[in-house]
Image (spheres, grey):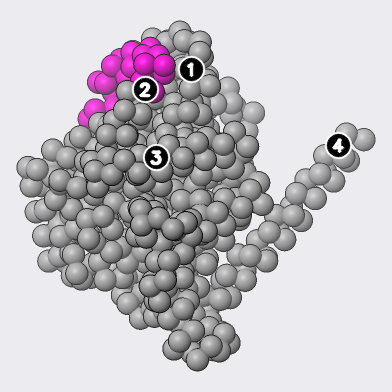
Amino acid sequence: MDFSSVLSGFAVAFEPQNLLFCLIGVTVGMLIGVLPGLGPAATIAILLPITYSLEPTAAVIMLAGIFYGAQYGGTITSVLLRMPGEASTVVTALDGHALARRGEAGPALGVAAIASFIGGTASILLLTFIAPALAGVALAFGPAEYTVLALIGIFLVGTLGSGSLWKSAAAAALGLLIATVGLDPLLGTPRFTFGTDQLADGIDFTIVAMGLFGVGEILYNLEHRDRPQPRVPAFGRAIPGRMHWLRSRMAILRGSVTGFVLGILPGGGATMSSLVSYAVEKRVAKDPSRFGKGAIEGVAGPESANNAAATSSFIPLLTLGIPANATMAVLFGALMLQGITPGPGLMNDHPDVFWGVVNSMYVGNLLLLALSIPLIGVFVRMLKVRPGVLAPLTVVITMLGVYSIRNNAFDMLLVVGLGLLGYGMRKLGFEPGPFVLAFVLGSLLEASFRRSMRLFGGDVTEFVQRPVSGVLVAVLVLTVVVVPLLRGVRARQSAAAARVTAE
C-alpha cells in the first residue's frame, strides 16, 4: 500500500470545499434516515443532476455521506418512536424503544451513536488496508473474469436479498432487458429503440434511478401518508452509564466484524448485517429473554454492524466495479457520470478520488457523532411534516433535475413511466434493488462476455480453464446451486421442528 497516497487523500478530504460537502451529505443523510420511506438510494438518485456541476471528489464525498449518514438518522426514530426511518434500524427499534419507554432513551441513543461511530471507523480502517490488496489482485482481471464476476453479483442479489427468490430474479431479468436498449456496443445496430432516435443512446442510468427510486418510492409512500403521530418520550442526557457500556462493548466489537464482512457481499449490506448481529447477540447472551424488553446489546450490536456494513460495501464498488447493493449501484452511476470508471484502475488513475472519498469517511463519522445528539429534537419535529406536502415538492425537484440533464422532455416521460413501473413493482412485492443492480451490471456483463467469446473463438470451456475465472465459476456455482439448497434444507428443518413442537 502506498502510504503517500493515503496521506494525500487526507489533504483532499480536508479541503474546505470537500469538508463542506461532507457536512452537507451526512446532514442530509441523517434527515433521510429520520423520514421513513424515501431512503438513501432514492435521495442520491434525485440529487444526481446536482453533481454535474461539482468536482468528482466533492460529488462522491457528498453522496457517500448521505448513505452512511442515513444509518445514524434511522436510529433516532427507531428508539424514540418505534418508527424505523431505515430498514437497517428495524432491529434497533425492538430494544431501543423498550429502553425509551422505561426512561432510558438518552443512554440508548448515546450507545447507538457511539456504536455507530466505532463500527463505521473500524470498517474504514479495514477498508484502507484491504482495498489496495484487492485492487492489486483485480488488476489481473480480463473480460472472462469480469463476465463471471458480473454474473455472481447478479445472482447474489437473489440468493442473499430479502423477499421471494423468483421475484428478485424476475426484477433482475427485467433490468438486464432494459440495459440492452440502444445501439449494439460492438455492431452499432439499434435494439429495442422502436424506431425513435430518443432511445438510440440507451436509457440513461440517472433516468432509471430517479424514476424507479424517486418517483416510484414517492407514489408508494403516499399510500401511507395518514399514519398517526406517536408521542415522543423524553430522552434527557444521551450519556450511557458504566453498566450500559460494560454490557455493550463486546456487542459493538462483534457487530463491527459482522457488519464489515457482510457489507462486502453483494446483496448483503446494512440491513442483513443488523439482523445477523442481533441474532448473534441473542445467541451469546446469558439471558436471551432480556432481548425485546430493553437489552442494550440489542441496540449496540446492530448499530455497529449496519454502519460497518455501510462502509465496507464501498470495497467491491471501488476495487472491482461491482455494486454490493442498490445504493452502491446509484453511486456507481454517479461516478460514471463524472467520467470515472469504478474498478481496479480507480486507485491508480484517480487516487485523489479514491483516497479522498475513503478518508472523508473518518471526518463524516466524527461529524455524525457530533451532530446526532444535538439535532434529535429538530429531526423529530421534521416527522410532523405531512407526506402530502413533501411528496409533490420532491416530484417537482425530480422532474426539473431530469430535464436539466439534456433539456429533453422525452426524458421526463421516461422517468414517469419508470416511476409507475417502480410503484407497480413495490405493490406486487418486487424489490427495485435487483432491477437497478442488474441494469448497472448488464452492460459490463454483455461487453465482457462478447469480448471473451471473441478471444476464446466461441469456446465456453475457456471460462473454466483459466485459473482466476475458473475459481470464480466455482463461486458462481456455489452461489446458484449450493446456497439455495442449504436454505431449502434449513427451511424444511425449521418446519419439521415447528410441527414437532406443535404436537
- What's the amino acid at mark 1? Arg
Pointer 4 and pointer 3: residues touching (CB < 8 Å)?
Answer: no
Q: Residue drawn at (39%, 23%), measured in percent from left and top? A: 391
Q: To which residue does mark 1 refer?
A: 225
Q: Residue drawn at (70%, 54%), measured in percent from left and top? A: 487
Density class for disc 1 (Cα within 10 Å; few <14, some 14-19, many ≥20) is few
Q: To which residue does mark 4 refer?
A: 501
Hey, which quadrant is residue 159 in on the image?
bottom right
Q: Residue drawn at (38%, 72%), measured in percent from left and top? A: 188
Q: To which residue does mark 3 refer?
A: 413
Q: Nearer the viewer, mark 2 or mark 3?
A: 3
Using the numbered discs, state the Cα–Cα distance from disc 4 to disc 1 in whole angstroms.
41 Å
Using the numbered discs, state the Cα–Cα distance from disc 1 to disc 2 in whole angstroms.
12 Å
Using the numbered discs, state the Cα–Cα distance from disc 2 to disc 4 in whole angstroms.
51 Å
> Over which residues does the magenta segment extend?
369-391
- Whole-percent x, y for residue 240 in the image: 36, 25
The front one of 152 and 499 is 152
